[in-house]
Every structure is written in C-alpha cells, then in structure tokens.
Amino acid sequence: MMGTGNSGFSATGLRRLRAVLAGHVESGRIPGLVALVSRGGETHVEAIGTMRHDGGPPMRRDTIFRMASTSKPVSIAAAMVLLDECRLRLDDPVTPWLPELADRRVLKRIDGPLDDTVPARRPITVRDVLTSTFGLGMDMTALGTPIMGEVFAQGLTPNLPEPMPEPDEWMRRLGTLPLMHQPGERWQYQISSDLVGVLVARVTGQSFETFLRERIFDPLGMKDTGFHVPADRIDRLPTLYAPDPQTGEFQVWDGAEGGRWSRPPAFQGGGGGLVSTADDYHAYFRMLLNGGMHGGQRILSRPAVELMTTNRLTPEQQAARTAMARDNVHVSFGQGQHGGWGFGMAVRTYRGDYAHEGQFGWDGGSGTSTYADPEKQLTGILLTQVGATVPNSTWAFHDFWTTVYQAIDD
C-alpha cells in the first residue's frame, strides 16, 4: 500500500523497499514478513508471503510474531515506570528484592574454575541491572568456559530444550553462580533483561505481565502483546523456523498450536518472551519518539525515555561492545554496528551504515528488527519467522534499513 506523499517518504523509495523485501520472500529464504515504516503522520505497511514455508495462509498486517530479543526495549519500560514513581532508585542495591544476589563472589578469570573467586567490591545496584552490567550474561566471547557451561546447564537462558523455570527457582539457580565480572564493570547480554522482569514483579507484587499490561500495553492499545498467544488468536501466529545451518533446510523450531507460546510460560521473560504485532510495536516506539506521550496521555516521563534511549556505557564498556560487533561478526552474521546501549536497547553512537547516530532499538533471533530514529522521527519494524541459525533474516534486516533510509525524502 502506498503512502500519502509529502510526509518525508518518496514513492520511489517505498517501491524499492517493497521490491527488495519481496525479493527476499521470492528467493525462498523467508516464507513471509510484515514490515512497517512510519514518519510524521504517515505509516506504510507491507505484508508479503505466507505463514509457513510450504504455503499456508498469507501474512497479514495483524500477524502475531515471537519478538525474541526485540522484547528487551519494550519490557524495560516497566522498570522505568517504577523509577518515575520512586519505587526504585538507580543506585540502590537490588538485594531487598533480590536477596539471592547478596554477597556475590566474582571469578578471578572469566575462563577460570567456578570456585576461583574474589568477593564483589560492592553490591549489585538497580542501575547495573538496567544497563546489563550486573556481572552475568550471555558472553559470545566466552563460549566453552565453565561459567557459560553452567549458565546453560542451569537453564538460565531461553531457547534451550527445556523452558526456563518459574522466577523464584530461576533466581535460586542464578544465586548459585559466581559473577563473571565485578558489578558495573562490563556490559553483558541477555540475563539482565530477564532479571528486570523478576525485579519488577517483586517490587510491585504483581506478575511482570500484569504490570506491563496495566501500565504499558493497555494504555498504548497493544492488544496483541503478551507472553503467550490465546487460543482464539493462535491462527495468527506463524510457524517459527530454525533452518539447518549447513543445508538451509527449513526446520520447525516452534509450531503455533501446542507450541511454546500457546500457553502461559512459567517464566515471563523480558529478554525474549513477548509476542506482538507490527502495529503494537509501532505504538510503543512512537511513544518513545514522542518523549513518553501517547495521544494526550503520559506513559513515561521524558527523562525516563531519555535515559533508556541514549548511551549509558562508559568508553571502556563501549569499546568492548564495538570490538564484539567488529570481530565476532561471524557469530551474528554482521548484526550489531551500534556502539552504545541504553536501558534494554542498543543506541547508535557512530555511523556504521545507513542509519543515523541516535537510532535506538534492537533485533531478535527469531527474525525481528525494531528501531526508531529521533533525528528523522522515523520508526521501522520488520518481522519474519526465520530464526538466526542462518543469515537470511539478518540480510533482510540490512536491506530493510538500507532502503528505509533511502526512502526518506526531505
């Protein structure tokens, strides 16, 4: 569907965007996708291809996708509400709510034995958790070390054969591990984002999902967003594929009916558990671009949004993240030239491709990409059902953003 002109997208640019995305589907590498771009008052949506790789119903604008790590920029908003209301303070220790994390030990070396530790220099703070620097995470540079082996063995991350346990048991297991780094020292991925959900639930006395629904989802009209898909909507959830890395053959990672998202999970994972639609995510990112406002309603304070969406890392922490983007490109198929990190999302601190500095958002391993650009007042969302076992969805992300930025016509 075409845009309405004079909003800053060129008709030629939108045609190229559609042609490039259609090419990814016609190649057979991506069964279907939904893309949304908006700028100013104009929203442009493409739904291309089918729900399954062997056909099935067509993709639609209201198709529900597993958001994977693009859950992170949305789920963090619950913690920002608590900061706004002074129910959390950034530099308070988390131990009143997360006593399992009291009196931490820290590995002397990231690849050392689990009992070769020193005491933590200070308690873990709320800020450490919100910036992903509390001391534990998915470290792609430390695969094969005893500590990463134990993170997997304890079932502390999503996408393992066994789903994550309920939050109190998850916390108990987390509390048995030493930290990889001193609190606040190093940015690390994933575990912080799930920890945020446990923290919010314990502070509020509500489930993480209930609090998100009352304070973020319902006010924004995000009616299809949650941690599972109800039975009356399961026909809108496509099959999720994890193609074989050697042959490229489509393998089902998660089906719709009877699959992982067909019932409420034991653990509501802020790091990767949400399902949503292009329009729901658009409402959320537009709210961030509007400084926390949705229509006439304030969802988050402007300072909360500014904290989330601007870089919070020190130069040393950022150097490690940039090195990972540059040197571990084979792990991520080249995803990740951002530099910075705010709360729950990447923030571009250097111009590494077509996107502008200041763009914020994140990508997901289930084939999702969601960002907003404050300078251009632009939101872009690309949702697929092809997991990152192969580069296909990452290639589509790159081409999507390349064409989105070309379509801006000022």
Image (cartoon, rainbow, N blue to C red):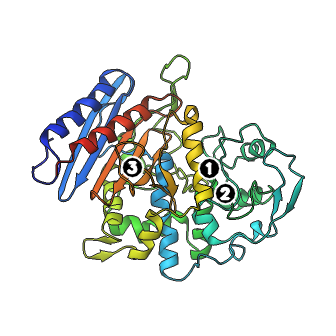
Residue tagged 2: 186
Label 3 environment density (alpha carbons within 10 Å; few <14, some 14–19, many ≥20): many
Using a 10 Å C-alpha cutoff, classify the residue at mark 1 as few (fewer than 14 neighbours), some (14 to 19) or many (20 or more): some
Q: Mark 3 or mark 2: which is in front?
A: 2
Q: Amino acid at mark 3?
A: Thr
Q: Nearer the viewer, residue 302 or 190?
A: 302
Disc 3 designates what residue?
A: 370
Quadrant of the rendered image containing residue 207: bottom right
Of mark 3 and mark 2, the one earlier in the sequence is: 2
The residue pinned by badge 1 equals 320
Q: Residue at x 56, y 56 (%)?
A: 268
As helix, strand or loop, the secondary structure at mark 2 comes to loop
Q: Residues within 10 Å of mark 2 (few under 14, many from 20)?
A: many
Task: Give the Cα separation between the discs numbered 2 and 1.
Answer: 8 Å
Q: Is residue 289 above or below residue 4?
A: below
Q: Earlier in the sequence, mark 1 or mark 3?
A: 1
Which quadrant does the N terminus fall into? top left
The image position of residue 179, as x and y in percent, is 77, 57
Q: Position of residue 37 (x, y in %)?
A: 26, 48
Which badge, 2 or 1, is on the more N-terminal residue? 2
Q: Amino acid at mark 2?
A: Arg
Tell me the CA gap for discs 1 and 3: 23 Å
